[in-house]
Amino acid sequence: MHKPDSELVDLVFDYMRERLQYDPVPLDHPGDGAHLREVLAGLLNEHGNNPADVLKLYDHELSRAVISADSPRYLSFIPCAPTKAALLFDMVVSCASLQGISWLEAAGAIAAENQVLRLIADRAGLPAAAGGVFVSGGSAGNLSALVVARDTARRRLAQLNGFGGPEARLRIAVADQVHSSVKNTFNIIGVEAFPVPAVDRRLTGAALRAALAADPHPETVIAVVGTAGTTNEGIVDDLAGIAEVAREHGLWFHVDGAYGGAGLFAPSVRERYNGIEHADSFVVDPHKWLFAPFDCAALIYRDPRLARAVHTQDAGYLDVLHTEGDEWNPTDYAYHLTRRARGLPLWFSLAVHGVQAYTDAIETGLRLAKDTAQLIRDTEHLELLHDPQLSAVCFRRTGWTHDDYYRWSRQLLADQVGFVTPTGWDGETVARFAFLHPGTTMEMVQEILDTMR
């Protein structure tokens, strides 16, 4: 190694060591666009810059204009709380340029990733033949799975009655609470939503059956998407009931568990997921509640052969990838070709800590939600909107308007007390906590709620 390279390695490793030792991780602040443009001006030039100066600029200016999703006071959207083991091994994946494209090129990495996919599939009760791939996030997973649902249905319908070609009007059943990425997927793949009225904010089998019975063309409905933990409220759909109706009508059953699917590892809520074992495809994001770094989502198929028939790309230079034996090419199970071995940090962390540690951490988030809900019930000026099923808690501050919530949220962040953004509830602005970080404490929650007096 040349001396300048050695100095650069030491510089970056020293910074990483310091960042990993933050306890707690600071929230930091939103960035000011004009200021950031000013400090970045001229940085990308013909001759480069002293790496120490660039790293100092990143540390003092850029990093502090990024709100830390791994802070225990980050309670908005869906936080991220990767283990130190996962973060460290993510550095290994990056510094070794580990890719995970094909068995020929990356058998070791793929074997380890598949071990984790098998663990998740077992928790969902999927058969031994189930398998899949790690993709970048729930959006990529939902898109890849529903393309398989569409094309599989097209082939089946064409064989049955000549119906189902590219011009056919195909629909997929969803409730209002389905994630926005699913609705976006419909636009991308050219299918329409078949809306099913929610019952107590859930998609139920009974409602799906009634909607199909009332529709003049139920044969155009090819799939149904159930949610295992809605992003806003953490509600798990009636997966068992949906699965039953899906079997009756020959529908592809996809489960979006991007946030809530990690609850499969928590005995206290496992029964809420009954029926997921019948899913044809299933997505869970370990970079949410399974304590992996961004970007990591597990996409699992009941019958991976169906996905391979849809996603395998045909090109002369790729023929060598498809041989006999242990071949498992992640490129065959989603829309991508190039991919990093993004499942390895999770694999390393699970191997180091053990699965029970993950169960304990997930149960911590569930307990925080339950205790916070009770605290809200016991506070006169606060009102709980829904008993938490998982780790999201929605509530209102009586008498507050839309502007009050946003002023409160901005002040919380400015004071570094917490990052809690308002959300919508039946057209009303309310407050919401999302508990994933096992380092969040009830003392932090109490401190935040005290600011609403």
Image (cartoon, grey):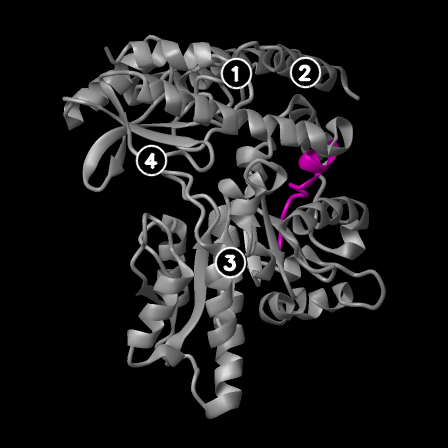
- Choose between 348 and 43: the one closer to the eye: 348
**How many tags in the picture?**
4
Does 343 appear above or below 45?
Answer: below
The local secondary structure at tag 4 comes to: loop
- Chain part drawn in magenta: 336-348
Q: Give how far apart the Cα atoms at labels 1 and 3 are.
A: 54 Å
Q: Describe residue 279's horizontal placement relative to residue 185 as left or right.
A: right
Instruction: State the mark number for residue 386.
Output: 4
Q: CA distance from mark 4 to mark 2?
A: 46 Å
Q: Earlier in the sequence, mark 1 or mark 3?
A: 1
Q: Is there CB contact under 8 Å for labels 1 and 3?
A: no
Up-down relation of residue 398 to residue 17 (above or below): below
Q: Pointer 1: what residue?
A: 54
> Which mark identifies residue 13?
2
Residue at (83, 68) in percent of width and height: 324
Disc 2 is placed on an element classified as helix
- Furthest residue in direction front, as rendered: 378
Q: Position of residue 239 (x, y in %)?
A: 49, 56
Check disc 2: other Cα within 10 Å, few if <14, some if 14-19, many if 20+.
few
Q: Quadrant of residue 343?
A: top right
Q: Earlier in the sequence, mark 4 or mark 2?
A: 2
Q: Which element carries disc 1, helix, strand or loop?
A: helix
**Of the residues tagged 4 and 1, which is closer to the observer?**
4
**Residue 52 picture quarter:** top right
- Residue type at tag 3: Ala
Residues at badges 1 and 2 in contact (C-beta under 8 Å)?
no
Instruction: Say if 139 sits above or below 434 in the image.
Output: below
Q: Residue at x 78, y 52 (%)?
A: 105
Instruction: Please report the residue visible at 25 percent of the width from the left and 29 percent of the height from the top.
Output: 430
* Residue type (three-letter) at the residue carrying disc 4: His
